Amino acid sequence: MKIERFPGGGLVLTTADFFINWARESSLWPLTFGLACCAIEMMAAYASRFDFERFGVMPRPSPRQADVMLIAGTVVKKMAEPIVTIYRQMPEPKFVISMGSCANCGGPYYDSYSVVKGVDKIIPVDIYIPGCPPRPETLQFAVIKLKEKMDSLKPTRLAMASPVQEKGTRSW
Ligand code: SF4
């Protein structure tokens, strides 16, 4: 972005990509998907002490208006199908943050018959947050990293959804 100053005013020059990315990053609306204890830390991030809304991050209960899915907790196989269905209902471009060891790889339940060994087995993940559980500040740092990743998007040159995005899932 370039700012040209002249007497009595100024002129801002930018690109459509920069402007769209800036607007999108400044109002990330996550679809919250609290599945286990990590969800308590996610909720704490929205509470007054951490105040996630300072980042423009406001939780949404509907996939139709959300652009980030926060998977916080243990993904059991029974929940895999609803997660994929809801992920497909989100508009493009959409992003996924996997919060905590359980969502990343099964965590303490990695050898359980009922737990998916990482949510990336069923939907594409953009940011992984390690920890059991990660603290709210870690979730906020993950959103900052996601914003950096979004900076590289070229919205004006976005093709249709990739085959993986179109499929909305990976086999597990
Ligand atoms: S990573 Fe730890 S804190 Fe998070 S859901 Fe799993 S067991 Fe609970």
Image (cartoon, grey):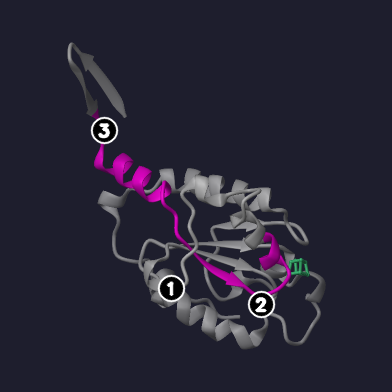
Rendering coords of residue 125 (x, y %): 55, 63
Q: Whereabouts is ligand 1, in terms of quadrant? A: bottom right
Rendered-image quadrant of the C terminus: bottom right
Q: Nearer the viewer, mark 3 or mark 1?
A: 1
What element does badge 2 sit on?
loop
What residue is rendered at 57% in x and 71% in y?
Answer: 33
Q: Earlier in the sequence, mark 1 or mark 2?
A: 1
Judge from the rendering whether residue 139 lies leftward or rightward of residue 56; answer left or right: right
Numbered circles on residues, count: 3
Residue marked by disc 1 = 62
What element does badge 1 sit on?
loop
Q: Residues within 10 Å of mark 2 (few under 14, many from 20)?
A: many
User: Which mark, residue 14?
Assistant: 3
- Does the magenta portion include 15? yes
Q: CA distance from mark 3 to mark 2?
A: 42 Å
In this rendering, does residue 168 appear at all? Answer: no
What element does badge 3 sit on?
loop
Residue marked by disc 2 = 75
